[in-house]
Amino acid sequence: MASVAVSLLALAIAVSAARPSLGAASNGGAAALVATGAPDAILARAVQDFHSNLIASARLGESPPGYAHGVWISYALKLHGGHFDFRRGTWQAQIITGLLRDISRDRGWPAVVGYGISLVLPNGTTRPWSQTSIRSSTPASIAPITEADVRSILKRTTKAAGVKLIEVTFVHPLGHLAVEATITTSKARGYIHDRYINDWAIIGPLLGHPGKPRVEGTLLVVRSPTTWLEVMSYAYRTTAGGATTNSHAP
């Protein structure tokens, strides 16, 4: 029997030739990106759009034993020693997986049912890290928003939380909008003690808490005046998130 990856590629070529390309949503004033070609080409473009060297490779294949039958995306992350490399690389993979799942569903391609993460070690070998299945659909549609609106929301929420917004950067995988924000707090212990409440008070309005989701995902870096405290990520389509804290922070 032909593998899922092969059947996916064959079906992709047939569908792409028979119907118009899927236009990705345009957010933040960016020009719409029309994703063309087979799923592996779309996957490669999504990785490229992050302008990051954290995802060393990404490939389509069959789901591993014990998981729902379908397409699985395998990522290899190459960490470069930064505090946030693992969290940021995983966040990028989670966003890409959600986009590929929805594009595949809309085009009638075989379903993307999950993703795997492996780590590329300094000696060049690869260590399997995790396998994660995903739900079949996004909880709710993402409402378009501009980069200026994102900045406005973050200025409002950080002010209300009593922290300072330091930096906001944007990425546009397949033309969709995701955001990274860095904040600083003078009350490090108090913030970390209630970090779940504090994090969601800041980024929640961008992710549908409350209201409609506005971005593909958020990566929040929390700092004190002297060091980093936490990096928290969330990818909306895959409803996947996590946080890494600095155990050496005072």
Image (cartoon, rainbow, N blue to C red):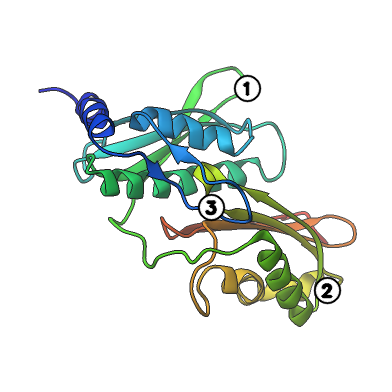
Please state which amino acid type lies under the numbered disc 2.
Lys
* Element type where label 2 sits in the image: loop
Q: Is residue 26 above or below residue 61?
A: below
Q: Is residue 192 visible?
A: no
Q: Is residue 226 left or right of residue 189?
A: right
* Element type where label 1 sits in the image: loop
Instruction: Answer whether labels 2 and 1 touch (C-beta < 8 Å).
Output: no
Pointer 2 residue: 187
Image quarter where the C terminus lies is bottom right
Mark 2–mark 3 Cα distance, whole angstroms, equals 38 Å
Q: Is residue 236 above or below residue 54?
A: below
Q: Is residue 124 above or below residue 135?
A: above
Q: Is residue 203 visible?
A: yes
Please state which amino acid type lies under the numbered disc 3.
Ser
Looking at marks 1 and 3 on the same chain, the residue that comes earlier in the sequence is marked by 3
- In the image, 101 versus 29, the foreground residue is 29
Pointer 1 residue: 122
- In the image, 33 versus 111, the foreground residue is 33
Q: Which mark is residue 26?
A: 3
Q: Position of residue 137 (x, y in %)?
A: 31, 58
Mark 2–mark 1 Cα distance, whole angstroms, equals 36 Å
Q: Residue at x 64, y 35 (%)?
A: 51
Q: Residue at x 19, y 25 (%)?
A: 3
Looking at marks 2 and 3 on the same chain, the residue that comes earlier in the sequence is marked by 3
User: Crowding at label 1, few (<14), some or many (≥20) Cα neighbours within 10 Å?
Assistant: few
Q: Position of residue 133 (x, y in %)?
A: 32, 49
